[in-house]
Amino acid sequence: MQSLKRSRNELSLQGREPKRTCSNPIRKASIFRDPFNPPIINRRRSRDAPTYCAHKTSSSCSLSLPVCCACADKRPQSSTYLRYVDGKGDAHYGTRDMGYCPGCQAYGIGNRYEILARPSERSLPSCEVDITAQKIRATCTNQTFEFLRSEDLTLEELRNKVAQLMWCNPTHLAVVATDMDLDTGVQSTKVDPALFSSCVKHVHFRLVYDIASGEDDKDDVEMEDVGC
């Protein structure tokens, strides 16, 4: 009967080490990447990540995302927000723009939800929107917003875009006049809704507050299309 020590010496002389098995082997991930079936985490992040923001350039946001701090904030709307206080811990007070970059805090878009709740306390500026085949350009007071146009916009989508730039509720924007035949009662166009932004060259929006409460402040918004 050969001893274990002698068998190991013979194996070492032959240039081979005895095989050792691990009771808990570590499974290595495959280095092969399938472009047609990416990981679930990557698919979830690419789906939830916003693509663009109209306030990114004007606010000089320093966030390493294609959107500003306010648009990237996914917290629910509330009148107070958690803030850490020395000696007290987390306290429910403060504004929504706490923790935003200095550019977003100075721009003032962190409090847009509070502004939407009280539209009569703020005089909104007028806005002129120019739509081309490649991009949409909106000029509000001394600020200009530019973002790419990926597809044709309907009347409701155009109203939502203008309302986002003016920080108002889309239901407060009424269509006053256009160069197309519109039914202003229901605010629906008689042309193909999918081709609204391609055919209409001029749309006049008017920002109307709650008339029943006596708020008669109005701001006009005019949209001109460079070409149809």
Image (spheres, rainbow, N blue to C red):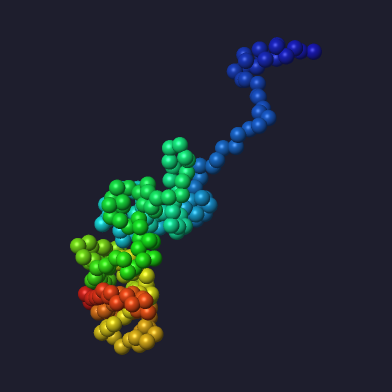
Q: Is residue 146 visible?
A: yes
Residue nearest the observer in this picture, 72 or 21: 72
14, above or below 224, in the image: above
Q: Please report the residue visible at 38 percent of the width from the left and 61 percent of the height from the top.
A: 114
Which of the 4 image quadrants contains residue 182? bottom left
> x, y percentage for residue 76?
47, 57
Of the 4 image quadrants, the one containing the N terminus is top right
221, above or below 186, in the image: above
Q: Please report the residue visible at 27 percent of the width from the left and 68 percent of the height from the top.
A: 124
> x, y percentage for residue 103?
28, 50
> x, y percentage for residue 84?
44, 42
> x, y percentage for residue 195?
34, 79
Which residue extends farthest right? 1
State left or right for residue 10 relative to residue 208.
right
State left or right for residue 175 relative to residue 86.
left
Which of the 4 image quadrants contains residue 67? bottom left
Which residue extends farthest front? 214
Residue nearest the observer in this picture, 31 or 88: 88
Residue nearest the observer in this picture, 90 or 103: 90
51, above or below 4, in the image: below
State left or right for residue 131 relative to residue 72.
left
Q: Please report the residue visible at 37 percent of the width from the left and 49 percent of the height from the top.
A: 98
